[in-house]
Image (cartoon, helix red, strand yellow):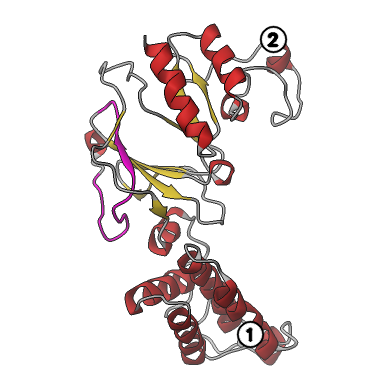
Amino acid sequence: MQRDSILAAAGHYTANGWHVFALGSTKRPVANCPRCRNDDHDREACECLMCHGFYAATTDMDRIAEMFNAVPDGMLAVRCGAISDLVVIDIDPAHGGQIDSDLMPVTRYAHSGNFGYHLDYRHPGVRIPPSQGRVAPGVDVRGDDSYAVLAPSIHPRTGRPYAWAQPCPPMIEMPPALVSACLPKPAAVASTRPMSTAAAAGISNPGRLLASILATVEKAPEGKRRTTLYGASRGVARMVAAGAIATNDAINALTDAGRAAGQSERETRTAIVGGFRDEGIAA
């Protein structure tokens, strides 16, 4: 039975820390109960079994079984984001979606029921907003405050199951370049004009601040160093924007930190360029 295979899969997902829940058979969350439709209350704390969509996601298999008792023909979905340590890149070829190997290195992936792909990456530790088409046409990002359908659910339109690739590569950390592409682009900083002393005066001790930022890269655990270097690059770029450090000195310091953390020249450069770009600074 489909319900049995769904629950077996849910047991595997929850054992790995993914928070899952039941969708209706049309890929939409189950409708809220009358109280939840009318009351303004904390969705995270709501005790209803399936109200508020992905807020109902859980690792409690008893609750998940109750969900599928209520909607036996429902689909299985995961709440993406930091809560499940997961970001899903949804590639839809029907809308022009393609896998960009420069942005999207090989990772665990599934074939979606509409002939596309779900690429799974470990969450980078910074909020990844859900988006449609920001990265590229036909590429949707299922980040924080969003959800993705899971195998072995059946697509309601095509009748095809979502299925993991065989063999399936291991899931890897979301690379800095992809993190950068998923984030909203900030307003450009007017960095071409020399900054006034007053602008830099907001940083009382630039040397100490720089050392503190670089220390986060040194202390980052293995598997988080690239994204930490990207975050550090954004912080140092803001120092450049404030006139507290010269661009070349900033890049040299970050490059040394990346090398010391075991990052390749390409990984280091990608993290720095992405961090500076997202602060509106040329690297």
The local crowd at label 1, few if under 14, some if 14 to 19, many if 20 or more residues have their Cα within 10 Å, is few
Residue drawn 29% across the image and 16% down it: 157
Amino acid carrying mark 2 in the image: Pro
The answer to whether residue 98 is above or below residue 240 is: above
The local crowd at label 2, few if under 14, some if 14 to 19, many if 20 or more residues have their Cα within 10 Å, is few
Q: Does the magenta portion include 101?
A: yes
The x, y position of residue 190, in whole percent, is: 53, 77
Front label number (2 vs 1): 1
Quadrant of the image containing the N terminus: top left
Q: Does the magenta portion include 131?
A: no
Q: Which residues are magenta?
A: 98-114
Where does label 1 land, which residue? Answer: 211
Quadrant of the image containing the C terminus: bottom left
Secondary structure state at the residue bearing disc 1: helix
CA distance for labels 2 and 1: 55 Å
* In the image: residue 126, left or right of residue 275: right
Q: Are marks 2 and 1 in contact (CB under 8 Å)?
A: no
Where does label 2 land, which residue? Answer: 34
Residue drawn 60% across the image and 87% down it: 243
Amino acid carrying mark 1 in the image: Ala
The x, y position of residue 224, in whole percent, is: 50, 63
Secondary structure state at the residue bearing disc 2: helix
* In the image: residue 118, left or right of residue 44: left
